[in-house]
Amino acid sequence: MVHSIINLSRLICLILLLFFLMIIQVEPENNNQPMDMTEIVVTPGKFSIVDHTRRSNLTLPKEEIADFPLIDNDIMRASQIFPGVVSNDFSARFSVRGGEKDEILVRLDGMELYEPFHLQDYGGALSVIDLGLLDRADLLMGGFPARYGGKMSGVFDIVSKDGNREEVTGDFGIDLINAHALLEVPISKQGDWILSIRRGYFDLLLPMIFSLLEEYEKEYRPEYADLYSKVGYDLTDKDKLSLNILYSWDKNLVNSYSGAEDLNSRYRNGMLWLKWRRFLNQQVWSDLFFLNGLSDRNRQEGFGGQRGKALDIRDLNYLGFKWEVFAKVANRHFFQFGLDWRQLGGRYDYFNQLGINQAKPIEVKIDKMGNDLNVYLQDEWRIYSRTSINFGIRFSRQSYRSEEVRKYELSPRIALTFKPVEDIVLRGAWGHYHQPINLLAIPVEDQYTEIGRAELASHFVLGAEYLGLENSHFLLEAYYKKLDNLTGRMHIYGRQPVILASPDSGKASGLELLIRHQISDRLKCSLGYGLSVAKERIGDKEFFRPFDQRHSMGLNLSYHLSLKSNLNVGWRFHSGQPSIPLANGTVGCERSIDEYNSERLPVYHSLDIRLTRLVHYEKWDMNVYFQIINLYSRKNIDARVLKIVEDDETASIIGCEVVDEPLLPIVPTLGFNIRF
């Protein structure tokens, strides 16, 4: 079946390429026309103690990100071009510097998002944020200040754009995966309204694809949609209000013809928050938020089979407020203070009897309420013209922790920037980063019912930037992370089950190099390389972490065929991730923990290209793109797993066999956006 899919993909690729070449025309370059430079910051190891009057040369324009060959033009997938980031073809989730995927804080307009991903039964294939909403996004990969809390590896901080207050504008787009619409409406001269709606159509596309294949064993019908609304209004010159609504919805139905792997699931994720920004003067202002949200799921697996079933029901809700104050003093100090309080409630109903080696079913029921309190204070102090220091502390408390453990943590952090000469910037950072288990993320799969101490990562970061060459930028960073009180694994649905072990502690260290260079007016390139080692300890034994990334490399070339046409080529490489050695076995499929992550999967590499063409009309523009993911159809491996072998007549389990689960084959996509 895999070969049939690849052959079908190649045929679709050829047809779409011919169609694209029919509409694209190469025009002469006109250097006199200005280009929109709305920017998105994507800086590995970015510190906030830089000179804010000068943007880093590592700043990437939003239009450049939009030209990357990315599945669904997903902004969170753009992080894969940087060393230190481990990503997966199937998922918009990513890990940073040897951490787990749930160790990344994702924020939108100052608010933390819970599980901001679609298609969670397939690993979280897409994020819920449309690229068209973006004003900027910052990626912080280590040593970030006390303002950011709750996660111990990194931060992906997204800021949405303001609406158009002059005229009604819109953006409509469609591609192989979904359709989206974005509308901007002025509300007098003091306000604006943005509405974004997306709807995926995998449920319509997959049956058509499978009907062209000779054989297939399952029927897939995943559905998803999301909505984002933002109303901004200026009460006075000093008082600005905004009301944000984010809602996402997923439904998935899998009918297995054998009846053993049926799935019926539903996910909802929504948040509403009101923000009031008050300017006391040009040096002091505050942000006050009121919020309310929910994040729930109802997942039933194996309900039509003979081996058992799994049930995962979670009803989670929260409300609260957040207050932040910012003050600039004498152009030397930038003080920040924040207080965040939330009331949370969580109800879990979990049952699983699908495991091969389970002596008895796993059943967990939880119904709890409690509150979170987070307070931070930090100062960014410019000591001299060439030296700045950022120091702060964060306090976190959870009322619903087990009575046997302390209910709070303190997280001190400090970072230093020094410019010995004009073209060189040196940075260093140290800090404690606690990641509590809150009521929205109890690992019930591991039979946890009580919440203990937070996980802890201690960061040590040293880096240097060189800005001396015109149109070039060099960044070199080294890091070391010490991990403690690790509570287990993030369980991701969608692939064959693998062995998951709960570590006690761990460590990660590495070296990263990033080079960006403007070769000519038309051609620019970036090259990233990362050397990384990530290990964890289970009892008295040490193993490689699942996201240990020994060598990784990303090369990206962007060539302007004209002002209206662009070619982008990206090549990604990383060494194989750790894997548990498996062998064809008996019904028990037993394996020893001594062999945990002692092997490596084959190396990963993929060549991706994208052609983009802007067509201008009198009252509207159309942006057309054609891209190919994995151009030479490399058979990359996602995981090596054991597959149950059944007797054809009795449907009883007779053994196990080792199966390589592949990542994406060649994937062609044609899409367009219409703006008016």
Image (tube, rainbow, N blue to C red):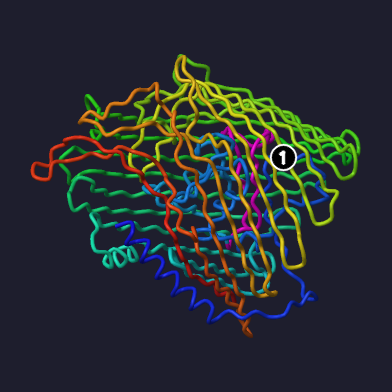
Magenta region includes residue 407? no
Q: Which residues are magenta?
A: 132-160
- Viewer-closest of 269 and 180: 180
Q: Position of residue 645 (x, y in %)?
A: 20, 40
> Helix, strand, or loop for circle 1?
strand
Q: Residue furthest left?
A: 649
Query: Up-down: is 450 above or below 415?
Result: above
Location of the C terminus (image quadrant): bottom right
Query: Up-down: is 140 above or below 363?
Result: below
Q: Is residue 258 left or right of residue 179?
A: left
- Viewer-closest of 352 and 472: 472
- Viewer-closest of 66 and 661: 661
- Residue 569 quadrant: bottom right
Q: Position of residue 354 (x, y in %)?
A: 24, 35
Q: Position of residue 154 (x, y in %)?
A: 60, 38
Q: Amino acid at mark 1?
A: Val
- Viewer-closest of 60 and 514: 514
Q: Residue at x 46, y 73 (%)?
A: 16
Q: Position of residue 362 (x, y in %)?
A: 27, 29
Magenta region includes residue 149? yes
Query: Up-down: is 203 above or below 659?
Result: below
Q: Is residue 157 left or right of residue 658?
A: right
Residue, disc 1: 325
Location of the N terminus (image quadrant): bottom left
